[in-house]
């Protein structure tokens, strides 16, 4: 029992930190600019593929630096020549612009690297078990993911709350005209923020790519879970996203560990016939089978009862 | 996200009063065209395609009740389409087993009822919020429903789905619905009724209030309308019509599968409606037809058709956010003032470099595709009827020149056309007083 | 005005669909309806490459009945509704042989449509050659005279796999883990039944279902497998659900044997090697390249030379097309009404090992030798590795045809 709880907690924290790593860029863009960036997962994918290509020719560690810079540059380009045009047409148009972007990025990646998974490997320096607990090994690479996620969180928090740049960015979100009149180039600020968000997505891609599967459909299979993290955490709050990722990571991990079902609680269903057959599907479903939909349930509940999210500073 | 109500190109012409006779005349003409279409295009493929388009049109129109009329961006609208289809399929199978005296013509109502009931259930939850929160809730509900469809294998038929035989229910007037043409008329009939109902809804006070809630929810609330209730009713009705579309799809394809309620279907209807134009009743119709035919024919022409589709969609979002219907509607004032013929030459002039730029761009894409993804097919290929070899530099140079040159000319031509349009618009909108007083 | 515009657009676009590209009349057309874009495109592209290879080869020898074989691809985007429209397009273009297999939901829709279409349109019949969908209902409750299945269905694979496992005294506790949809449930149900049957010393310690293509972190599942004390895992997971699970097992240092259906699909062999699991992972298929049958090995070398970036292929597709061409030649007609009777009941030498398989007329299921192969370092006489890893599939056991036969509930409606 202790073993299960301990292992599940450890696994949940590690998974939650991976989620935060992936969602950090989205949080920045969504919280700072109010743009729900559907193309976030596509930037993540670009980061993974660029990282793969660079690791093939130079190495993993240069890839970790260069790929996010490249993707950040692409992000800034997209903001300057795409999003900025669309901004005047309203939020719906912005959203749909990023939605259309996902098609394009996926097709280009598929053209260049093919549709199959590529062999993106964990760097040999980190390819060993870091420690063993209850006879389960934990690879050093996972610890590296954890440390990177925490580092990014701390750096972002520092920059946003304690530096002048961060203050200007926060102000530009709610009072863009005033900030402009004070002499700051608001357009350039937004471009920078979008670039940083895209770059963070790429960092997540470079790091998660070897651990997960680097394939042209990885953006699509990541799915909307990142939106759940950001919305549950709350708009405008980085700490909220951090806590939400931990929460979702732990929730999913503990759910998988549980095999409870209605049948366990109330006994097996007896009888035959169509009706019983229909009900038995629900009766015998275990909590583990529902683990993947729990984040969405959480999303719907939070939006109904506390649309501000856990620690959001404002609604919508 | 309160300015989600700032819909691009909300059609001012919606407000124009129109006589009952002219409205009816338009609908009668449409009915007549629908009647003769299958006689004119009578290949199996044409009829099947028109059936698919008919179903998609009803679905897209129901979505526009949410997006265009009430300003609600939903990412889970396919839920009602899919659930309508499944319940219709179950109803058909039950009718077959119990020999119920119900003809096929009434079964889409089952889909509609299912859509309405689930619209009410999910609407009660979703419409408490608006804007981004609403969009996220619909996304979450969509995911929940499509995951449940995999778990509840008996209700949703698992991977095989629920299959039906549409010929095995009561036959009225000897119509068996075996031949696809008969199904076409069923879909056309229901389509006309549904579209008529949805159009009528836009003309009622309720429809107007939805527009008010879309444009300025705070003000609508001040006047005394409960915005949540308005949204809730609009959501439920949109579910009703989506359910009818789903029921017709189940009848048409004789199967209901869980892909019909998934995220891809929800995403496609958003794209269709937006491309067609959200501010205009005919917009979703145009969008549904265009996107369906693109999906069916583009994939034959090139294996990277989704890239072209994505670029086309982004172009619409950036340069024509009111959609195709919006672009057409903007020409109407010119047409009425007899100014259109002045601008058309400019449009044609802009079209030519546009096509040239497109040819250049598509050449580049196809050649890159051949090298990167299909190297096994060899370096010889033919584009636009011209044979070329991707390893020689000539086609690349030609493509770049066409793209860059055509693109530059296109931008200039568009600027000139826009000037011409603005001038013509000014003339069209000037009050027609006689000569100015000197 | 706007409505008229809308209707004018209807007319224009319906016109567009009515104008079909002119097709060369004198070829034997094979319509390939599978995903060529979007999610399933990788699998669909493999089948298309293979069909083109087959067509080139047979056209070089003069074609079938003197006509050249033409492969026409139709991208169904893995959507059942789009598939039906594409098949209608194929029928209009004169195609009478439809090859489709990726995605059991699409296969079920196609099978059902072909059945109804053929009964409502006598004289225009088409035949459905299913090379990959293995949902048992396709050849049991929903069987059809016009449908032929060439991949061993779930029941056959489970029968062969569980017989192998029961005969292996080292296997005592088996953990079942499958994807949570009807395919996964049919595998789990059949496996649990067979492994717990009379006389089996195997204990099924768990029957787990993983949400389909939604799980990123498999470590909690690995923890459960470890906690159960199982020595073997039986899984029909495919794609990311298998690759991520294997990677997680490697990370956690779990040492069990894995008995899978789809470990041979692109990407998984690399994941197995990354996880360092040599000779731990097994799969059940109709054969592997390292079987000592020279004609097959020569052909495979040619294929890999032509498609070096995607060397994976389906052996059963070679068998299927060989049988179809043979049936057409024997019937001297490309009309399905005439060659379907020749195809059912046909005995044929499998592509992969030259042994004889047969198409059972009761349910139109092809029965062939099944092989259980393990993944690991290769010996001198095993020339084929996977994905440049240096490891390859080695035969662990061959299950003869007669030991793969399962019963069927098919009540096939035959034309008079």
Image (tube, grey):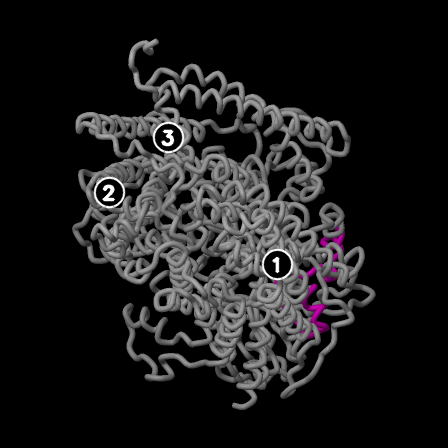
Label 2 marks which chain's residue?
Answer: B
Label 3 marks which chain's residue?
Answer: C
Asked whether the residues under the numbered discs 3 and 2 touch, taking CB atoms below 8 Å apart as contact, a structural biologist would say no
Label 1 marks which chain's residue?
Answer: A
State the image quarter where residue B226 is shown: bottom left
User: Which range is magenta?
Assistant: C270-299
Task: Determine crowd level at label 2: few under 14, some 14-19, many 20+ residues with C-alpha closer than 10 A.
Answer: some
Q: Residue C31: percent from the left, percent from the top?
A: 53, 41
Q: Is residue B178 above or below residue C209?
A: above
Residue at numbered disc 2: B208
Q: Are marks 1 and 2 on the same chain?
A: no
Q: Is residue B374 above or below residue C239?
A: above
Q: Residue at x 64, y 40 (%)?
A: C55
Residue C285 covered by magenta stretch: yes
Residue at numbered disc 3: C10
The N terminus of chain C - image quarter? top left
Task: Locate residue B22 relative to residue C244 in the image: left or right.
Answer: left
């Amino acid at each position: 029992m202790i073993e299960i709880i301990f292992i599940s907690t450890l696994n949940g924290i590690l998974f939650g930190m991976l989620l935060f790593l992936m969602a950090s860029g989205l949080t920045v863009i969504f919280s700072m600019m109010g743009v729900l960036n559907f193309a976030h997962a596509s930037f993540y994918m670009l980061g993974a593929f660029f990282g793969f290509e660079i690791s093939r020719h130079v190495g993993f560690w240069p890839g970790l630096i260069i790929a996010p810079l490249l993707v950040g540059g692409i992000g800034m380009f997209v903001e300057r020549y795409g999003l900025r045009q669309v901004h005047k047409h309203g939020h719906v148009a912005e959203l749909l612009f990023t939605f259309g972007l996902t098609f394009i990025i996926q097709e280009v990646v598929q053209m260049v690297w093919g549709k199959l998974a590529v062999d993106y490997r964990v760097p040999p320096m980190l390819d060993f078990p870091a420690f063993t607990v209850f006879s389960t090994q934990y690879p050093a690479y996972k610890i590296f993911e954890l440390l990177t996620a925490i580092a990014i969180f701390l750096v972002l928090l520092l920059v946003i709350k304690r530096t002048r740049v961060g203050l200007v960015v926060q102000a530009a979100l709610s009072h863009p005209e005033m900030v402009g009149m004070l002499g700051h180039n608001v357009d350039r600020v937004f471009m920078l923020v979008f670039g940083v968000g895209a770059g963070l997505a790429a960092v997540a891609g470079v790091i998660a790519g070897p651990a997960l599967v680097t394939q042209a459909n990885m953006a699509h299979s990541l799915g909307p879970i990142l939106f759940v993290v950001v919305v549950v955490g709350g708009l405008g709050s980085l700490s909220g996203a951090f806590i939400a990722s931990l929460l979702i990571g732990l929730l999913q991990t503990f759910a998988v560990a549980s095999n409870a079902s209605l049948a366990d609680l109330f006994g097996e269903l007896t009888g035959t016939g169509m009706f019983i057959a229909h009900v038995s599907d629900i009766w015998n479903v275990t909590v583990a089978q529902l683990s993947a939909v729990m984040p969405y349930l959480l999303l719907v509940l939070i939006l109904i009862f506390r649309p501000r999210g856990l620690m959001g500073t404002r609604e919508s | 996200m309160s300015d989600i109500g700032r819909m691009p190109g909300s059609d001012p012409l919606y407000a124009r009063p129109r006589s009952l006779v002219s409205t009816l005349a338009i609908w009668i003409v449409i009915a007549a065209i629908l009647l003769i279409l299958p006689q004119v295009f009578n290949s199996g493929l044409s009829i099947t395609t028109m059936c698919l388009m008919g179903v998609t049109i009803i679905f897209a129109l129901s979505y526009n009740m949410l997006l265009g009329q009430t300003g609600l961006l939903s990412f889970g609208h396919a839920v009602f389409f899919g659930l309508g289809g499944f319940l219709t399929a179950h109803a058909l199978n039950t009718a077959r087993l119990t020999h119920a005296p119900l003809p096929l013509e009434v079964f889409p109502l089952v889909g509609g009822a299912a859509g309405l009931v689930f619209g009410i259930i999910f609407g009660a939850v979703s419409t408490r919020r608006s804007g981004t929160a609403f969009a996220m809730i619909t996304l979450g509900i969509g995911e929940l429903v499509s995951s449940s469809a995999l778990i509840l294998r008996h209700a949703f038929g698992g991977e095989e789905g629920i299959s039906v035989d549409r010929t095995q229910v009561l036959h009225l007037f000897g119509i068996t619905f075996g031949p696809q043409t008969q199904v076409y008329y069923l879909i056309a009939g229901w389509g006309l009724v549904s579209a008529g109902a949805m159009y009528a809804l836009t003309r009622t006070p309720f429809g107007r209030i939805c527009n008010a809630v879309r444009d300025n929810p705070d003000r609508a609330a001040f006047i005394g309308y409960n915005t949540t209730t308005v949204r809730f009713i609009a959501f439920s009705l949109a579910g009703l019509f989506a359910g009818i579309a789903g029921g017709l799809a189940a009848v048409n394809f004789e199967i209901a599968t869980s892909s019909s309620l998934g995220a891809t279907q929800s995403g496609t209807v958003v794209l269709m409606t937006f491309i067609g134009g959200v501010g205009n009743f005919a917009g979703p119709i145009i969008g549904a037809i265009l996107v369906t035919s693109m999906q069916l024919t583009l994939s034959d022409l090139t294996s990277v058709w989704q890239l072209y589709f994505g670029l086309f969609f982004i172009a619409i979002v950036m340069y024509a956010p009111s959609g195709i219907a919006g672009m057409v509607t903007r020409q109407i004032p010119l047409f009425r003032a007899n100014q259109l013929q002045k601008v058309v030459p400019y449009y044609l002039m802009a079209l030519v470099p546009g096509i040239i730029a497109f040819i250049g761009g598509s050449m580049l894409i196809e050649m890159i595709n051949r090298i990167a993804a299909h190297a096994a097919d060899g370096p010889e290929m033919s584009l636009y009827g011209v044979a070329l070899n991707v390893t020689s530099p000539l086609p690349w140079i030609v493509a770049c020149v066409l793209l860059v040159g055509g693109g530059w000319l296109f931008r200039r031509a568009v600027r000139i056309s826009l000037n011409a349009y603005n001038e013509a618009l000014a003339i069209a909108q000037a009050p027609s007083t006689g000569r100015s007083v000197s | 005005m706007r409505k008229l515009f809308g209707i004018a657009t209807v007319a224009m676009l319906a016109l567009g669909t009515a104008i079909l590209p002119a097709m060369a009349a004198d070829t034997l057309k094979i319509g390939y309806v599978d995903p060529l874009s979007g999610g399933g495109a990788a699998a669909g592209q493999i089948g298309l490459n293979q069909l083109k290879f087959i067509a080139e080869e047979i056209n070089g020898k003069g074609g079938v009945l003197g006509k050249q074989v033409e492969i026409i691809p139709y991208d169904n985007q893995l959507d059942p509704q789009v598939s039906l429209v594409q098949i209608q397009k194929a029928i209009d273009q004169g195609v009478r042989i439809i090859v489709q297999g990726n995605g059991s939901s699409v296969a079920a829709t196609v099978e059902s449509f072909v059945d109804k279409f053929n009964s409502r349109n006598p004289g225009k019949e088409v035949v459905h050659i299913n090379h990959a969908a293995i949902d048992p209902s396709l050849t049991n409750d929903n069987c059809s005279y016009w449908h032929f299945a060439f991949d061993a269905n779930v029941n056959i694979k489970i029968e062969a796999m569980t017989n192998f496992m029961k005969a292996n005294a080292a296997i005592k506790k088996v953990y079942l883990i499958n994807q949570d949809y009807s395919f996964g449930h049919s595998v789990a149900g059949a496996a649990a039944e067979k492994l717990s049957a009379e006389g089996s010393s195997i204990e099924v310690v768990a029957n787990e279902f993983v949400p389909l293509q939604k799980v990123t972190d498999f470590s909690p599942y690995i923890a459960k497998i470890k906690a159960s004390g199982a020595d073997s895992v039986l899984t029909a997971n495919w794609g990311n659900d298998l690759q991520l699970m294997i990677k997680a097992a490697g990370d956690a240092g779990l040492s069990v044997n894995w008995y899978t259906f789809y470990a041979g699909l692109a990407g998984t062999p690399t994941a197995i090697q990354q996880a360092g699991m040599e000779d731990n992972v097994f799969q059940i298929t109709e054969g592997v390249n390292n079987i000592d049958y020279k004609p097959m090995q020569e052909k495979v070398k040619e294929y890999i030379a032509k498609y070096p970036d995607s060397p994976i292929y389906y052996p059963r597709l070679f068998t299927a097309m060989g049988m179809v061409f043979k049936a057409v030649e024997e019937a001297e007609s490309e009309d399905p009404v005439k060659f379907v009777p020749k195809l059912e009941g046909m005995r044929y030498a499998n592509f992969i090992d030259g042994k004889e398989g047969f198409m059972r007329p009761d349910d139109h299921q092809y029965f062939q030798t099944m092989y259980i192969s393990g993944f690991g370092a290769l010996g001198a006489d095993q020339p084929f590795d996977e994905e440049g890893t240096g490891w390859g599939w080695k035969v662990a056991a061959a299950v003869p045809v007669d030991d793969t036969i399962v019963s069927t509930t098919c009540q096939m409606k035959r034309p008079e």
